[in-house]
Image (tube, helix red, strand yellow):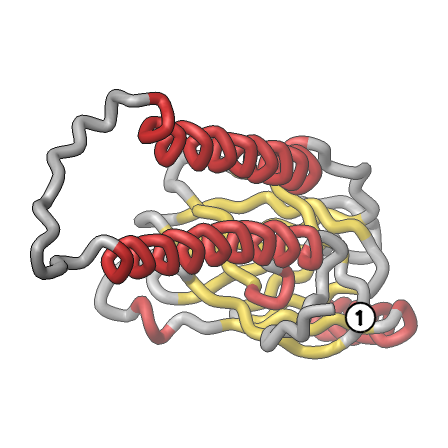
């Protein structure tokens, strides 16, 4: 099992890491093999006293095999990568599980705003809970997010989720995540959006159900004061 430097917190983080690892192993294997063969041929066919260099056209069958066989093997590896990439893409981007909670995420120069349903459980009503640069969510809960941008192109990125989604002005983009462990982690803007781009970090706080309900109650109490 490969030890990942960045913690895997979402349910699909491991799938994305495994795909990247597979691509790295395949390309690494071919890189090493090609370099070994290349250097081996240089040594084997280096200039030797009394041996005249040959002109090779590459048209003979035994010569063509040096290109044809590796080419076919590389194509098989490409097919494996494509199958793996499409499977992950469909699972993460196209087949969204039913939402248990929904949150609106808004990027603007230079902060992240979050809108969550209040006690009525409905988004875009009077009791919505609004926060800036801090998103509170429940562990083991499927969230759909409605991602927007108020001004320029931003990109909502949660590295521990392996989540990165562009926020485009004039569009509402729906995505999802499900955190599998509690903790506090970074939210980044992964698209250069102006001079304050590096000054808009935020954080996501993943809480147990009891902790999250207590936080929601505290926010609702503040709103009534």
The image quadrant where one finds the C terminus is: bottom right
- Of all residues shown, which one is farthest toward the right? 210
Image quadrant of residue 49? Answer: bottom left
Q: Is residue 158 above or below residue 215?
A: above
Where is residue 21 shown, x and y percent of the image? 59, 58
Which quarter of the image is occupied by the N terminus?
bottom right
In this view of the protein, which residue sits in the foreground, 37 or 114? 37
Q: In which quarter of the view is residue 212 placed?
A: bottom right
Task: Mark yes or no: residue 126 visible.
Answer: no
> Which residue is found at the position 30% from the left and 60% from the top?
39
* Residue 97 in the image, given as x and y percentages of width and height: 79, 38
For residue 29, side relative to residue 218 (left or right): left
Q: In the rendered view, does 113 fall on the left or right side of 108? A: right
169 vs 31: above or below: above
At a point 85% along the width and 76% down the height, the residue shown is 211
Please state which of residues 21 and 73 is positioned toward the viewer in this rendering: 73
Residue tagged 1: 181
Callout 1 crowding tier (Cα within 10 Å): few <14, some 14–19, many ≥20: some
């Amino acid at each position: 099992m490969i030890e990942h430097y960045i913690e895997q917190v979402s349910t699909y983080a491991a799938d994305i890491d495994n795909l990247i690892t597979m691509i790295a192993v395949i390309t690494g294997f071919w890189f090493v093999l090609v370099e070994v063969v290349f250097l081996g041929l240089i040594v084997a066919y280096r200039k030797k006293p009394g041996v005249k260099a040959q002109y090779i056209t590459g048209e003979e069958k035994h010569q063509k095999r040096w290109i044809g066989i590796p080419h076919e093997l590389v194509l098989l590896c490409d097919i494996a990568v494509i199958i793996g990439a499409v499977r992950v893409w469909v699972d993460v981007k196209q087949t969204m599980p039913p939402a248990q909670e929904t949150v609106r995420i808004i990027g603007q120069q230079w902060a992240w705003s979050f809108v969550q349903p209040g006690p009525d459980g409905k988004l875009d009503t009077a009791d919505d809970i609004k926060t800036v640069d801090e998103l509170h969510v429940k562990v083991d809960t499927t969230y759909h997010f409605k991602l927007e941008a108020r001004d320029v192109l931003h990109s909502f990125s949660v590295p521990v989720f392996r989540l990165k989604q562009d926020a485009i002005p004039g569009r509402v983009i729906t995505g999802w995540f499900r955190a599998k462990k509690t903790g506090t982690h970074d939210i980044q803007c992964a698209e250069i959006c102006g001079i304050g781009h590096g000054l808009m970090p935020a954080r996501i706080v993943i809480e147990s159900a009891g902790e999250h309900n207590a936080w929601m109650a505290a926010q609702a109490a503040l709103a009534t004061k």
